[in-house]
Amino acid sequence: SQYGTFLSPRLSALLRWKGWTGRLSGGQGFFAPTPLTEETEAAGLSRLVIPRPLLAERGRSASFDLTRSYGPLTYNATLFASDVRNPLYVERDTVYELTNLKEPAKNTGVELLATFRKTKGKSSFPVTASYTYVRSREVVAGISADTPLTPRQSLGISGMWEREVGRIGLESYY
């Protein structure tokens, strides 16, 4: 109630055609502000200044993904975009303060996934490889720049042994 009333609608459409699955999704949401961010967590809160009341962050997003399975292989490609109005920003150059930016933060990107799954009896052995490219930008003092702590590219692989009683796996990300 401190930040107002919010509506978080989401609309998705799913289409299946000759072994392909496509999904288009869009929506909006919100996040109440908090001084506990990745940046303030590292530096601590004792010196943090909040010069004016913070506004809730409001986000809009859209994505399109396409999936195809062929035997033990599944491929997925996702295109996504979002913008966040009133994003929180931690100023650390001259003062240590938390404020909302006036311009929205924008994210666009693509994620590629491939999964190989071998099943033997009651056990399965999936291996998933992923690659993500994200362009994350925010406008600070009139200058558009990459958002800190958001990697431009990431790569990962995970392997898992699954059975009814549990799972054991290994993951590696760069």
Image: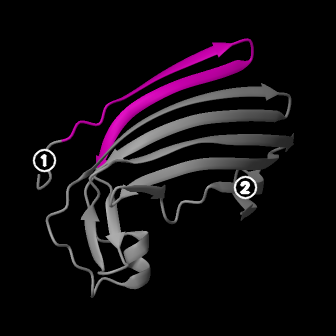
The correct choice, above or below, for 46 with respect to 40 in the image is below
Residue 25, x across and y down, in percent? 47, 28
Q: Residues within 10 Å of mark 1 (few under 14, many from 20)?
A: few
| Start-end of magenta stretch | 6-30
Q: Residue at x 72, y 42 (%)?
A: 113
What amino acid does circle 1 point to?
Gly
**Disc on res. 4:** 1
Q: Quadrant of residue 110?
A: top right
Q: Main secondary structure of the magenta part?
A: strand
Instruction: Say whether residue 53 is left or right of residue 141.
Output: left
**Element class at badge 2:** strand
The residue under label 2 is 155
The correct choice, above or below, for 31 with respect to 98 in the image is above
Assess whether residue 21 is covered by the magenta stretch: yes
Instruction: Say whether residue 163 is left or right of residue 103.
Output: right
Q: Residue at x 23, y 36 (%)?
A: 7
Residue 102, x across and y down, in percent? 26, 53
Instruction: Say whether residue 58 is left or right of residue 116.
Output: left
**Disc on res. 54:** none
Q: Residue furthest front?
A: 142
The correct choice, above or below, for 124 with respect to 89 in the image is above
Instruction: Say whether residue 114 is left or right of residue 59.
Output: right
Colour mode of the rendering: one colour
Give the Cα distance between marks 1 and 2: 39 Å
Front-most of residues 75 and 101? 101
Q: In which quadrant is the C terminus drawn?
A: bottom right
What amino acid does circle 2 point to?
Leu
Assess whether residue 102 is covered by the magenta stretch: no
Residue 96, x across and y down, in percent? 30, 80
**Element class at badge 1:** loop
Q: Residue furthest top?
A: 18
